[in-house]
Structure formats: C-alpha cells, structure tokens
Image (cartoon, helix red, strand yellow):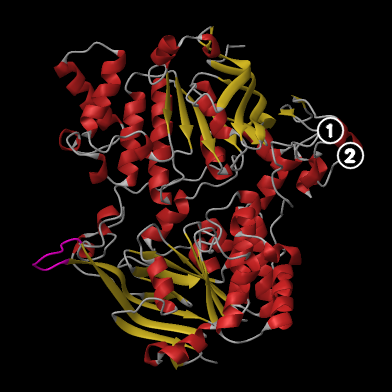
Amino acid sequence: MSAPLLQVRDLRKSFPVGGGGFGRRARLVAVDGVDLDVTSGETVGLVGESGCGKSTLARLALRLIEPDSGEIRFEDRDLRALGRRELRGMRRRMQIVFQDPFASLNPRMTAGETIAEGLRVHGLARGAERESRVAQLLEIVGLAPEHAGRYPHEFSGGQRQRIGIARALALEPRLIVADEPVSSLDVSIQAQILNLLLDLQRRFGLAYLFISHDLRVVRHLSRRVAVMYLGRIVEYGPADSLYGRPQHPYTEALLSAVPVPDPTTRHRRIVLSGDVPSPIAPPPGCPFHPRCPKAIARCATERPALREIAPQHVTACHLAPF
Amino acid sequence: MTEPVLAVRGLRTSFDTPRGRLPAVDRVDLELFAGETLGVVGESGCGKSVTALSILRLLPQPPAAIEAGEILFEGRDLLRLSNEEMRHIRGNRIAMIFQEPMTCLNPVFRIGDQIGEALAVHRSLSRTERAARVLELLELVGISDPRKRARDYPHQLSGGMRQRVMIAMALANDPAVLIADEPTTALDVTIQAQILELLERLKSRFAMAVLLITHDLGIVAESAERLAVLYAGRVVETGTVLEIFAQPLHPYTAGLLAALPSARTRPGELLHVIAGRVPDLVSRPAGCSFRERCTRALDVCAERDPALERGRAGHFVACHNPVSPAEVRA
C-alpha cells in the first residue's frame, strides 16, 4: 500500500496563557499527542466541540503554526524539515478553506485578484493565461466569469465560500483542509456547498480533512471520522462503524445529542452534565471521566490509550468494547 | 376550541433603508397556545427575529415601523398599548431569550443582582424574599451551588451557564409566553442538549407557551408541536410538526427538509439543492416570492401572490401548486 498523503504522528502544541510579568505562566495544551492519516482522494472528518483543538490540529497539519513536537509527513516528506522555500512549494499541494468566507477574503481585492494571487505568488500563470484560468475556476465553483471584477461585499455568504474554494483550487492541490466550511451558511446554501465539495473531489481526486462540529454533515462527507476531546483523539474509525456502534461514551453522547429532523422517532438523548473542563488544567486519568456516565474508579487515575476494538476502529476508553 | 394565548394577525414591519422601504415581514399570521412550543423556522433574513421583536415592540422606530396588523395577548392588542403599559408586559407576561446571552447580561453586575432587578421591576418583594427567589430561580435552571454563583459576574460563567442565567431572568416573573430566538445556536451540541432539555422541563412545569425561533429543523422536530415556515417575510406553511414533516406541501419546506443530510440520505450522494437565493425584499417581484427558485412554478405564480389556505394534508400553505404526497415519497 502506498504511504498516506498526510501523516501526523504524536503531534503536540500548547500555548502560554495569562500571567505576564514574572513567574511561570500556565500553558493551554491545545493538541496533545495526535496521530492522523489522510489517504489520497479520501475524506477524513474531524469532529469535536469548541476548544477541543480541531482547528489548531488543522493549522499544525499544514504547518501554518509550528508544533512543539511530533511529526508531519506530506507526500512522504517531513514537513518540519523543510526550509521556507521548499515549504512554500509544498503548500501548493495543500490548501485550506476557512469558516468565515468574509473574514478570509481581502475586502479590497476583487474575486479575480483573490483567486489569481496564488498563481502569481507561485509564478504559475501570467497575463491572459492567468485570466482564463481564473474564469475557468469561477466556472468550476459555480460562479460566472464576470464575477471576477467584483468585491467580496457584493457577494452572498454562499458565493463568498465558493470564492474561497476557487482560491484553494487554483494551485491544483491534492489535499484541502476545510475548517467548518459550511457552519455559517443557511441550510439550502449549505447543501449547495457540500455538493460542490463532493463534485470537486470526484473530478480532481482531492483529499479532504473536513473539520466540523456538525455530525450530520461530517457523516455525509467522510469515509473515516476522528472525534476529539480536550486535545486528543478519543475515537477514530470508519464512519459506518463509528456512527453505528460508537465505542467511546463521549462519541455516544455527542451522537445522541444531535437533533434528528424526524418527529416520528423519539431517540434517547444522553445529556452530559457540566461543561468541557479547562484545557489549562485537564482532569487526571481519562479527561472525559468527570462527565462520563459510565466512569469507574480506574478512569480517574489511569489515562486510557487508543486501542483497536474493531477493524480500523480505535477508541481510548477502558470499558470498550461495550 | 381554546383561544390562543398570543395571536399575530396580518403583521407588517418595514425598515427604512438607504435603498428604500424594506418590508421585512408582511401579512404574518401566527397563533400560540398555552403549553405548546411553536417552532418558527426559516433562513437568515426571512423575518423570524423581526416578528419576535415586533411582538415585544423592541425594534427601534425609526428605522423600523410596524405598519399593519395586530398582536393579541390576554385580550388586548399589544400594538395599541402605551409604552408604560408595554413595560408591564415585557419581561413579565412575555419574556424573551436570545442567541447571545451577553446581549441581555450586564458585564459589570453580579448575576444574582441582575436577576433580582428583573424581579424588582415587576414585583414588590422584600430584600430577603427577593434573594430567596433568585436562589430558587438559579436552582430551577440547573445551576449548581447557586449561593456562590449568584455572586459571580457574567464573564466567570461558561456559555451554557450564561444561557441558563438568561433563562432564569426570563422566568423570574412566571411569564405566560417565552420567546426563544435561536437559544442554542451559539452552543456546542452537548450543551445545546442540556438547554433544550431544560426548556422542555420548564415548559411543562409552568404550562408556558414557547415561541421557538430556529434555523435547525432537527430542533423543531424534537422540541416543537407546531411549526411555521417563513420565507422572505411571509408564512408559507404552518401546521403540526408531524403533518409537515410527513407531508410538506410548500416546495420550499420540502426543499429544506430534503437539503439536510439525514437517515434517508446515503453518505456521499448529492444533496437536494434549492437553487438561487432569497429575493431582494426592497424590490420584491410580483407574485410568489419563491417562484424564481421553485421547480414547480406555474404562470399564475408570477401574477398572484398565493394566500395562506388550508391544504390537502390538513395544514395551511401559501402555494398555487403544492407538493403532492406521491412526490414526497419519491
């Protein structure tokens, strides 16, 4: 089997918080020893609640921020060993699409300039060739060539997200990291963008690392899904297996909490008590144990490691399989 | 049949904009009965929040103007009350909670004092009575260690806890109607489940009527008994949740339901899409507002705006060519 397109091993990142002045500053552990693979042409979904570290992980994977430790391999090359020039060359093949299509577009650049910027920076096309490439990209994402001359404020939210996607596509990447790309969009527009992502994947063989807090959307797009809690992956497996037979109490609660748009089924909601603990002082043992309805004494002292409990399906829970 | 607690009839609210008059809601009819939750769904700009704010007369006028209609509550038309009379309704008989709790919490006051103030405005209670009631309310909304929490400032609380405090404030005076405008949209899914559970428990305990504004059809399916779908400032379909989910009549409702990834869609298959986008309300086209995005549009749709009428499946729909049962199953 060929090596995965993206391979992340034991990745760690913490940020200093508060303090200032003298004395030791506390550290917020955002990503705490994560392993993740994305194979060419597949979609891996990454779910979790606010502050679980999913966006930090996305940025680390592209080396947009520097990890404290760990390994990132893209196309079987060690990203952390690359110099700036080489890294920039590599970035052509891995792009990112952000949640807020307004904040991520420069309001003083036209859609055409935004899309062409990558081509210009990488010296890939100039003059008439660049223009025709921009027109082609606009068409691919469902906009018209005449949109090239307009500014971000002239577009709707869904159209801006299409521009963000066209910008990512311009350099013909193999991997797109999509960080909550449909979270700020209305349902009918969300469906348009999800269809576009599916269509582009089929046409160009793209791989996606698709990050979302919406479990329904992740299920629809992803072949494999990872669930994060307090900086760690607590469960990872094929989407069918993970959604069908979740093997971590957190995944189980998360899935049961998603409102189902079908009034004839009354499913049982597992309501977790309390909030997500602070990542500055995470609980000892299993970080989920204070909220876990199934916790036993061992969970408060011993941190569970990821173990395989079904083919390709791993979970970090002492009690699995259950 | 019982009388509704709250009835909105023929509401039209417009805004003055540099581009002209924008009718944000027009001819909106809603009825809310005691002890029920009415879900109001629709996409950004459809007029859900404007309807809610019009009911409480919370829109700044100008630029807003309530141009037509009546809002009947406890036998009176709220639109005809003086400002003083309206103050006795607001936060007392009709309360409202918002998406972002910080819009109604003051960052520089302790939360116990803020809830106490909501009580003091509408009731004459002694200091000790008031303090006891504050603790009772905090306990009611599931805040542990209320005595200690009452002394906290809003920034010391998590998003879910702030939402609970806002709900405690809203419930302070036993309202007959609670308007909840996207109360869980800013929350994580496990915290959302906690808040939805809390609202359900409180509703049945106090026989409150809840007007639940949301964009999430999943929340409506789980929490509401009846539903009103808004599109471009109009109610396009209304009825019980069971009827509408089983047999949507308006092509927009049917499209919204089909656009969601659900148990019925296979992973990776293309989702149903409603082409185009919401029309510009300043220059609303003649006829049905949805017709330019509608795959079922007839000639008549460009000529006459359809009225909300009883449809085949027992609920009300504003459409000249409603979806038939056979098509929904297909």
Q: Residue at x 60, y 44 (%)?
A: A262
Report whether residue A268 is seen.
Answer: yes
Judge by depth and name the residue closer to the eye, B168 or A122.
Answer: A122
Q: Is residue A21 magenta?
A: yes
Q: Is residue A298 magenta?
A: no
Judge by depth and name the residue closer to the eye, B221 or A276.
Answer: A276
Judge by depth and name the residue closer to the eye, B28 or A258.
Answer: B28
Is the residue at mark 1 from the same chain as the one at mark 2? yes
Which chain's residue wears label 2?
A: B
In the rendered image, residue A240, in percent from the top left (x then y), is placed at 55, 67
On screen, A297 above or below A304?
Answer: above
On screen, A16 above or below B154?
Answer: below
- Spatial CA span between label 1 and label 2: 8 Å
- Graded by Cα atoms within 10 Å as few (under 14), some (14 to 19) or many (20 or more), the crowding at tag 2 reads few
**Residue A223 bears which disc, if any?**
none
Residue at the disc numbered 2: B298
Amino acid under disc 1:
His
In the visual, does B315 lie left or right of A311? right
Number of marks in the rendered image: 2
Name which quarter of the figure residue A67 lies in. Answer: bottom left
Q: Residue at x 53, y 53 (%)?
A: A184
Q: Which portion, as a residue range, is magenta?
A: A18-25
Q: Secondary structure at mark 2?
A: loop
Q: Secondary structure at mark 1?
A: loop
